Every structure is written in C-alpha cells, then in structure tokens.
Image (spheres, rainbow, N blue to C red):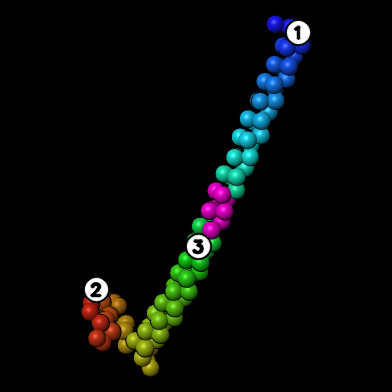
Amino acid sequence: VTTVGRLIAAGLMIGGLALVGIVTATFASWLVQKVDEAAESSSQQHRAGLESLSDEVEALRAQVATLTASLAGPGGQAGRAEQDSGAAVVPDGAAPA
C-alpha cells in the first residue's frame, strides 16, 4: 500500500460520493416537480368546481327571489300567514320536504 494508491483511492471515494449526491439531487428535483404539477392540476380542478358551485348558488338565489316575489303576490302579504304559522310553503306540483 503506497501513498499514491491511498490518494487515488481517496479521490475515487470522493468522486463516488459526489456522483451519488448528484443522482440523488436529480431524482429529488424530478420528484418535487411531479408533485408540484399534480398539486397545480388538482388546484385548477378545485377552482373550476368552486366556480361551478358559485354559479349554481347564484341561480338558486335568483329562484328563491322569484318564488318569494310570486308568493308575496300583489299585496305583498300572501305568504305571510304560512310563514308566521310555521307551515311549509310548497309550490304547486312539488312534494313537501
């Protein structure tokens, strides 16, 4: 065992460790990129679903406003007796809940 041999062995070990570090860092970078892409895709789907639900809520609010106005009638008091007595107001043709 010579000093030159030991220096060569030390250099090879350092080079091997550097190679393992580079491969590990490359794999970690690739993995983080894939996770970010999946998270972004999921986030976009959630935003689209949220927008759809928001539109549906707005449509339901418009329907409630229309039904409330139609129940109020011209005098504005037609639906008041049912609301005060606690009875459910059910539109024609709809089953009570």
Mark 2 = which residue? Answer: 97
Given residues 22 and 96, the one toward you in this image is 22
Q: Which element type, helix, strand or loop, lies under badge 3? A: helix
Can residue 87 be seen here? The reply is no
User: Against 17, is 3 above or below?
Assistant: above
Q: Residues within 10 Å of mark 3 (few under 14, many from 20)?
A: few
Amino acid found under the numbered disc labelled 3: Gln
Whether residue 65 appears in this view of the structure is yes
- The mark nearer the N terminus, 1 or 3, is 1
What element does badge 1 sit on?
helix
Q: Kindly identify which numbered label has been placed on residue 12.
A: none
Say which residue label 3 marks.
45
Q: Residues within 10 Å of mark 1 (few under 14, many from 20)?
A: few
Q: Give how far across and how far down residue 50 sits, in percent.
A: 49, 65
Snapshot quadrant of residue 27 = top right
Of tags 1 and 3, the one toward the viewer is 1
Of discs 1 and 2, which sits in the foreground?
Answer: 1
Tell me how many marks there are: 3
Q: Classify 30 as above or below 48.
A: above
| Residue under pointer 1 | 3
Q: Amino acid at mark 2?
A: Ala
Is disc 2 placed on a helix, strand or loop? loop
Q: Left of 75 or right of it: where is 20?
A: right
Front residue (pair 6, 22): 6
- Where does residue 82 sit, x and y in percent of width and height? 27, 80
The stretch of residues the image draws in magenta is: 34-41
